[in-house]
Amino acid sequence: MKSFLICIALTLPLTSVSAEEWKQLFDGKTLNGWMSWRTKKPLKEGGWQVKDGTLHHSKRGGDIYTAEAFENFELELEWKTTGNSGIFIRVDTNAKGAIYSLAPEMQIMRRNAGQLYALYPPTKKPTIHADGWNKVKIRLVNGHGTHWLNGQKLYEYQIGSQDWNKRVAKSKFKKNIKHFGMKAKGHIGFQDHGASVSFRNIRIRTIKE
C-alpha cells in the first residue's frame, strides 16, 4: 500500500498551475470588447475597423485596449503589417498620457519584430514573415513573462526583478520606474504607429494557480 501511494505521488504534477479554456478577444465581425485609449470609450469604426475578418488599422485611429483586464494569462494572436505597431501588456487605464508610458510593448515591425521595446531584445534573430502572417505567444504568470514569435522563444523576464529595474532605469521609461509594468491586472493593447496593421485569431486564456 505504501509503495502504491508513493507511485501515485510521483505521477502528480509538480505545479498546480492550470489554464482555463481559450477566450476569443476578437470575434472577426465587430469591435466588441475593444476600447479607444483616446476616449476611454468602446471603440468605433474609423481608423480601426473589421476588414476581411481581421482587426485592421489603416489610418490614424489611436491606440486601443481590451475592455477586460487580465493578470496571469497566455495570449496568442497573428499579425501582419507594412510598417510599425506593437502589442501592449499590463495596460493601466489610469496612466497619464500615452498608453506606453506604463505598459510594456512587444514590438511589431515588418522586418525587425519581437523585442520587448527598449528592454529585452530577442536572444537570437527571429524568423519574420515580412509580407505574411506572424504568430505571437505571450505567457505572463506572476510577473514572469515569456515571449515567442513564429514558434521561436525570444526571451524571458521577471517584472520587478533587479534585472528588470536595471533595464527600465536605462530606458526612456526611467521616470516611471516604480510603476512601469507593475499593474498586475492590466489590459491588452494594440498600438497605432501610423502603419497599416492587421490582427487575427486573437485569443487568451487565464492561468490559474
Image (cartoon, rainbow, N blue to C red):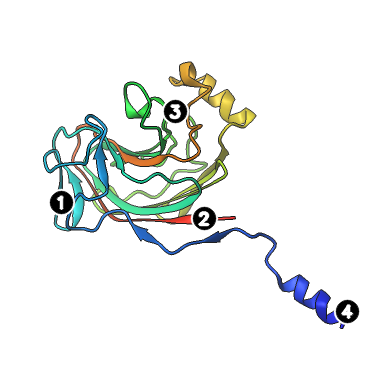
Q: Secondary structure at mark 2?
A: strand
Classify residue 23 by image quadrant.
bottom left
What is the CA distance from the residue labelled 4 to the residue labelled 2?
34 Å
**Residue highlighted by disc 3:** 118
**Residue highlighted by disc 1:** 50
What is the CA distance from the residue labelled 2 to the residue labelled 1?
29 Å
Residue drawn at x 56%, y 61% is 18
Which mark sits nearer the N-terminus, 4 or 2?
4
**Is residue 131 shown left or right of residue 156?**
left
Residue 128 position within the rendered picture, expressed as x and y whole percent measured from the top left: 35, 48
Amino acid at the residue labelled 4: Lys
**Residue highlighted by disc 4:** 2
Amino acid at the residue labelled 3: Ala
Amino acid at the residue labelled 1: Val
Q: Residues within 10 Å of mark 3 (few under 14, many from 20)?
A: some
Q: Residue furthest right?
A: 2
